Image (cartoon, rainbow, N blue to C red):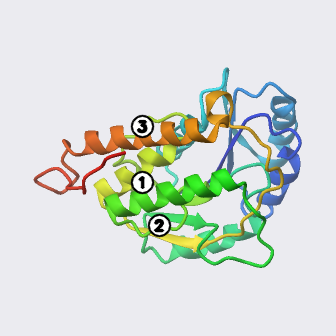
Amino acid sequence: MLIAIPVFNEAAYLARVLRQVSGFHRDILVVDDGSTDATPDILERLRPELGLRIIRHPVNRGYGQSLIDAFNMADREGWDWTITMDCDEQHEPEMIPEFIRMIEQDRWDIISGSRYMQPRTDDDLPPVDRRSINATLTSMLNDLFHLGLTDAFCGFKAHRTSAMRRLRLDESGYAFPMQLWPQVAWAGLRLTEIPVRLIYHDANRHFGGDLDDPSNRLEHYLRVLHHEVLRLATETPPGSDEPMAVCGCTC
């Protein structure tokens, strides 16, 4: 099992998070997505201490591309599972053993964290626009694909490598979930969620460019989802004789 952590300018959190993660699992891949702060130097200092594997993008290629590169490395190097998590202290390393426990049950292909499945008294309040966009798109995905999701955008997940090999992922940016979830349904992967704490240390963190505007961000996510629905409507899923049927999409 490989822990994969995409990072972009995370110098403030990097060393602390990686040391915490290493206390639960030692096989860690960091995908540095073109960081321009001290992140590369910190990674080089920590590499021998923690035995890090590092992929470095010379320029920022996007959150989705970082995940895709992590899945590809896991496949090349023979890892059965990849657990993805963020490096900004919004995901608790203490949950890694719970993901491992679920992996060992061998019942699922994707085990996805959900911040809304079981609300807690110590949850943080998310920015209103992020919660609204998440709820809107989670509901839309469930209507289209009957996934039963409660949180479409949590990046804390476990992915079975052999299952991910069946997907055709190329969405490089933050709209990655809008491609992932339709393809999970298309490929018939077995999905479950587990509750994780809702943490927002910095509600002012930026997406960058036009995506900092909530209306632009929602429109972008909807475009990616619409494109994926149209594409999958013409492709035959593994083990099927005809394309997947989805309900009408007006997004």
Inspect this view and state whether residue 201 appears.
yes
Q: What's the mark number on residue 122? A: none
Q: Which residue type carries mark 1?
A: Trp
Q: Residue furthest left?
A: 241
Give residue 227's position: percent from left, percent from top. Answer: 34, 37
How far apart, in angstroms, are the residues tagged by discs 1 and 2?
10 Å
- Marks 1 and 2, the one that precedes in the sequence: 2
How far apart, in angstroms, are the residues tagged by discs 1 and 3?
14 Å
Inspect this view and state whether residue 80 appears.
no
**Above or below for 185 versus 37:** below
Residue drawn at point x = 59 percent, y = 65 percent: 113
Q: Which residue is mark 2?
A: 149
Give residue 92's position: percent from left, percent from top. Answer: 75, 64
Quarter occupied by the C terminus: top left
Q: Nearer the viewer, mark 1 or mark 3?
A: 3
Q: Which residue is mark 3?
A: 223
Q: Nearer the viewer, residue 218 or 109?
A: 218
Residue drawn at point x = 49 percent, y = 38 percent: 219
Give residue 147's position: percent from left, percent from top. Answer: 39, 65
Q: Which residue is mark 1?
A: 181
Residue contact at pointers 1 and 2, CB within 8 angstroms: yes
Q: Which residue type carries mark 3?
A: Arg
Q: Nearer the viewer, mark 2 or mark 3?
A: 3
User: Residue 83 occupies which quadrant of the picture?
Assistant: bottom right
